């Protein structure tokens, strides 16, 4: 018997009972569809986050006062903690692996313009901050070293603040009130939207010296810095320097338990993302496994019914010369045909929903791009085929062993 | 169709044995309970014979046919086909014999439902080990023509009358050009006109060199055959050969 005959026989059997075939395939369709959809969505989200990491720049690092806590404990970042001094910043700036550093002081308070009010995050930092954070203006300019020297009351405002206070009218040159002090707007930032699920268009940047004057603080709430190539090397340098300056003894196990500062980087976030996507993959694989198993039982059930229903037909095929192998392959191919077709329908539906979802989310989050995981699709197809074989083999063997005359007598 | 030289002179001469049984027995077993059906069947069938098996209901006619047609196993004695022992054949060999050398026409037609006449007749060819796929359609059409159903090739099997169905079954039986065609009451479910058509088809196969073995209840049908074997309670009670008797009669009359 030719392979072609097997395929045409199997496809006829599947298409004769369309509704039943479809219902049988439902488990496989849902399983494969869910896997394709979820891996696609996962890939899209990954794309968004990677884009943001890219946006921040892979060489960007931040240092916070606080401690990771003992092994497995929670991280504590304390803005009021006085671990990071401006002298520390100058010392770090001397490191050859660090290209620029900008200490940050947060200033509490709101923003007003006439009767309009906004609730910004006011950030006092040096001009290097713009570079470190990849910030661009849409109008006006950044503050510079001169503003820093003379502690000018100038502000660079985020696009959302500009919208809230000026409703699209020109903001540059206007006088606004920040924490009850008068500032001149010198620049408006380009809108960027969400970065790491945080809106950053609501910030206002003022000179560091001005912020220090306003708050009277002698410590930074955080440092942002840019490293040369490898962030791991800069990481180690900064850590060693700060430990030495703060007189910290490193425990024997080399842990960060005694540190009074935390070092973070975008690249680190990328590593965390990697771990997250691995656990996501495990989760999806489990879902796929379970639904394919359940779908497989459905297939086996229907194949058994279909073999019983066609006992006479199988008897006849044997009577006209079909070998055991011919019948076995026929039923097996029929079962694989069902799972594979289910898989293909599932893939089509999964991609379809993934696409519609992407089109919808795109309206709110421009960085969200439609994506599918080709690997997951091939894996799903392979799993569907294996399911078809695994759950088809028993009905197929049963059919192939039928005795021609007994099968023909079957009522 | 093969054009084996048809010569009645060969019949009964015993020089081209096709089928031979020696003390062939058959019992059915249901839950250890033995039902003996055939007893000590001794039978020799030559190529190109036309045999009718007759006997009352339950005498074992179908059982014998199934065994001779390799659809069932005997439980005692010997069955030799072309001198080869049937009990020594494995599953694949049996399948090959069914595909190439014998074929069956069932009383209940046993056509594939929801399949066309063409597809039904073509079915044995897809299991045939040597006929190439490229010849299938041509052979199928020829077989359908032989039973005069060319106009109905595309009809589904459930759109046919009983007589037409049985002719489809005959076309299916002859499409592989087997040596022997077994027909178990091929006219049993048909009216007399359809029955005559079916018998004509079988007669033609016989004259083309095929060996025909059929089961029937009707004397009129049996009269088409050259040899009539009668079964009673699982034993052969009578075996008459027209030509032998004619020959004997002729010889007798010559003697006189
Ligand atoms: N599968 C079976 N199990 C047990 N006994 C059976 C089986 N098949 C047939 N028999 C018995 O074998 C005997 C012969 O049956 P068979 O079908 O060969 O008779 P038949 O001569 O063809 O009769 P009919 O003319 O009615 O078709 C019957 O007594 C029947 O009851
Ligand atoms: Mg019978």
Image (cartoon, coloured by chain):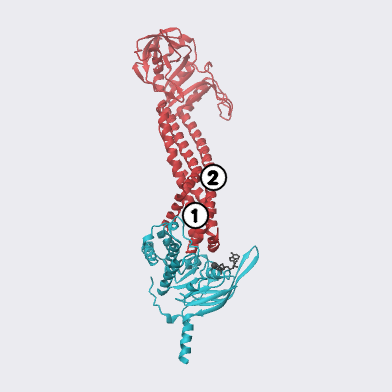
Among the chains pictured, the one given red colouring is A
Residue B164 location, quadrant: bottom left
Say what secondary structure mark 1 lies in.
helix
Pinpoint the chain carrying mark 2. Answer: A
The residue identified by callout 1 is: A331
Among the chains pictured, the one given cyan colouring is B
* Viewport quadrant of the C terminus of chain A: bottom right
Q: With respect to residue A221, does A314 lie above or below?
A: below
Q: Mark 1 and mark 2: span between their CA atoms?
A: 19 Å
Q: Position of residue B100 (x, y in %)?
A: 45, 68
Residue B174 location, quadrant: bottom left
Residue A208 location, quadrant: top left
Q: Position of residue A239 (x, y in %)?
A: 50, 25
- Residue A47 visible? The answer is yes
Say what secondary structure mark 2 lies in.
helix
Instruction: Please name whichever residue, A327 or B118, is drawn nearer the observer in this view of the structure.
Output: B118
């Amino acid at each position: 018997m030719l392979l072609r005959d097997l395929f045409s026989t199997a496809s006829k059997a599947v298409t004769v009972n369309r509704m039943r075939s479809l219902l049988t395939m439902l488990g496989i369709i849902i399983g494969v569809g869910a896997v394709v959809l979820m891996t696609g969505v996962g890939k899209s989200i990954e794309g968004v986050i990677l884009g943001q990491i890219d946006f921040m720049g892979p060489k960007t690092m931040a240092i916070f006062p606080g401690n990771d806590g003992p092994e497995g404990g929670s991280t504590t970042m304390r803005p009021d903690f006085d671990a990071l001094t401006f002298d520390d910043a100058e010392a770090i700036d001397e490191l050859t692996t660090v290209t620029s550093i900008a200490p940050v002081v947060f200033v509490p308070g709101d923003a007003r313009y006439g009767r309009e009010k906004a609730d910004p995050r006011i950030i006092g930092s040096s001009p290097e901050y713009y570079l470190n954070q990849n910030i661009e203006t849409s109008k006006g300019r950044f503050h510079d070293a001169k503003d820093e020297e003379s502690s000018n009351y100038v502000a660079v405002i985020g696009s959302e603040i500009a919208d809230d206070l000026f409703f699209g009218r020109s903001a540059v040159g206007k006088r606004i009130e920040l924490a009850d002090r008068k500032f001149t707007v010198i620049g408006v930032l380009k809108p960027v939207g969400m970065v790491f699920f945080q809106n950053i268009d609501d910030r206002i940047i003022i000179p560091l010296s001005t912020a220090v004057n306003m708050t009277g603080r002698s410590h930074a709430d955080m440092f942002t810095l840019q490293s040369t190539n490898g962030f791991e090397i800069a990481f180690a340098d900064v850590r060693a320097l700060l430990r030495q300056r703060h007189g910290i003894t490193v425990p024997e196990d080399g842990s960060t338990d005694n540190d009074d500062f935390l070092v973070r980087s975008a690249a680190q976030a990328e590593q965390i993302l990697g771990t997250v996507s691995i656990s996501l993959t495990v989760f999806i694989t489990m879902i796929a496994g379970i639904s394919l198993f359940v779908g497989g039982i459905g297939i086996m059930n229907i194949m058994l019914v279909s073999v019983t229903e066609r006992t006479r037909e199988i008897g006849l095929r044997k009577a006209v010369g079909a070998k055991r192998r011919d019948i076995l392959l026929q039923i097996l191919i029929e079962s694989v045909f069902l799972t594979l077709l289910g898989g293909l329908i599932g893939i089509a539906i999964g991609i379809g929903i993934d696409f519609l979802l992407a089109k919808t989310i795109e309206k709110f989050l421009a960085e969200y791009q439609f994506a599918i995981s080709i690997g997951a699709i091939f894996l799903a197809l392979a799993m569907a085929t294996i399911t078809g074989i695994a759950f088809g083999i028993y009905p197929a063997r049963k059919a192939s062993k039928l005795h021609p005359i007994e099968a023909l007598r079957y009522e | 169709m093969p054009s084996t030289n048809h010569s009645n002179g060969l019949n009964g001469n015993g020089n081209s044995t096709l089928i031979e049984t020696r003390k062939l027995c058959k019992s059915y077993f249901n839950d250890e309970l033995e039902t003996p059906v055939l007893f000590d069947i001794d039978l020799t069938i030559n190529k190109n014979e036309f045999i009718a098996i007759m006997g009352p209901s339950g005498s074992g006619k179908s059982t014998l046919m199934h065994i001779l047609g390799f659809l069932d196993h005997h439980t005692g004695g010997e069955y030799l086909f072309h001198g080869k022992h049937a009990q020594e054949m494995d599953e694949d060999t049996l399948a090959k014999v069914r595909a190439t050398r014998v074929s069956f026409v069932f009383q209940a037609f046993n056509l594939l439902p929801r399949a066309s006449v063409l597809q039904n007749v073509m079915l044995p060819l897809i299991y045939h080990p040597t006929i190439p796929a490229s010849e299938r359609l041509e052979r199928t059409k020829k077989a359908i023509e032989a039973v005069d159903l060319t106009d109905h090739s595309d009809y589904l099997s459930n759109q046919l009358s009983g007589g037409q169905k049985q002719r489809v079954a005959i076309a299916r039986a002859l499409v592989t050009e087997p040596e022997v065609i077994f027909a178990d009451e091929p006219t049993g479910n048909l009216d007399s006109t359809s029955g005559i058509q079916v018998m004509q088809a079988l007669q033609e196969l016989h004259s083309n060199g095929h060996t025909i073995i059929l089961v029937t209840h009707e004397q009129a049908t049996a009269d088409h055959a050259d040899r009539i074997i009668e079964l009673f309670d699982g034993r052969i009670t009578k075996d008459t050969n027209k030509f032998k008797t004619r020959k004997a009669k002729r010889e007798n009359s010559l003697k006189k």
